[in-house]
Image: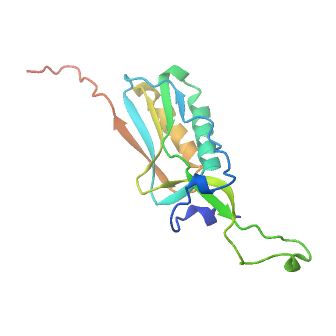
Amino acid sequence: MRGRNYREIKGHAYVRREFISSIPRNKIAKFNIGTPRQDYDFKLELRARERAQIRHNALEAARVAANKKLSDIDATNYHLLVKAYPHVVLRENKMLAMAGADRLQEGMRKAFGKPVGLAARVEIDGVILEVSSRMENLKEAKEALQVAASKLPIPTYVKKVLLKQTKVEGQTSG
């Protein structure tokens, strides 16, 4: 199957795990990487430009790519967080594609499909990945999120959020 078959959001989410016999395992190894601290200067958010579903293997590829770019700075100087959680179960009605398959296939009869993967539903401006760090690591953090965005099936953008206001020298309060 193609990725575009699962990218668009169609119908209700298939998430009731008590009714699903064999759910595929989530491929995201870690959701938190680095050191979560309170003294970071900024937070960069990778946000979605359109509403879509992102498969769990695409999220894992984006996380690995971002972490590899961020490995140049020390692991105590950043915090990478995967915000989108893949909870929607994707189904596929597998068909045979060989000689003589027309006599073995059932076609659209009982075409509910078997679970093949998981996906995270992301709305417009939904946060996918988040990187917190200090100001001297701003360039590396932006590059890491741009590389991670290339692994995702939807257009994205990076939003910067300041966590601390930096003091401007020469000004006095009063």
Q: Position of residue 98 (x, y in %)?
A: 89, 72
Please say if 123 is above or below 111: above
Q: Is residue 50 something one can see in this rendering?
A: yes
Nearest the viewer among 1 and 161 is 1
Nearest the viewer among 161 and 26 is 26
The answer to which image quadrant residue 95 occupies is bottom right
Q: Residue at x 67, y 45 (%)?
A: 25
Q: Residue at x 54, y 38 (%)?
A: 144
Nearest the viewer among 47 and 171 is 47
Left or right side of 61 for 82: left
* Residue farthest toward the bottom in the current orientation of the protein: 103
* Residue farthest toward the front in the current orientation of the protein: 18
Q: Position of residue 150 (x, y in %)?
A: 58, 49
Q: Residue at x 16, y 22 (%)?
A: 171
Please say if 5 is above or below 136: below
Q: Is residue 2 something one can see in this rendering?
A: no
Q: Position of residue 165 (x, y in %)?
A: 27, 28
Please say if 3 is above or below 46: below
Q: Which image quarter holds the N terminus?
A: bottom right
Please say if 48 is above or below 91: above
Nearest the viewer among 22 and 161 is 22
Q: Residue at x 52, y 64 (%)?
A: 9
Q: Which image quarter holds the C terminus?
A: top left
The answer to which image quadrant residue 168 occupies is top left
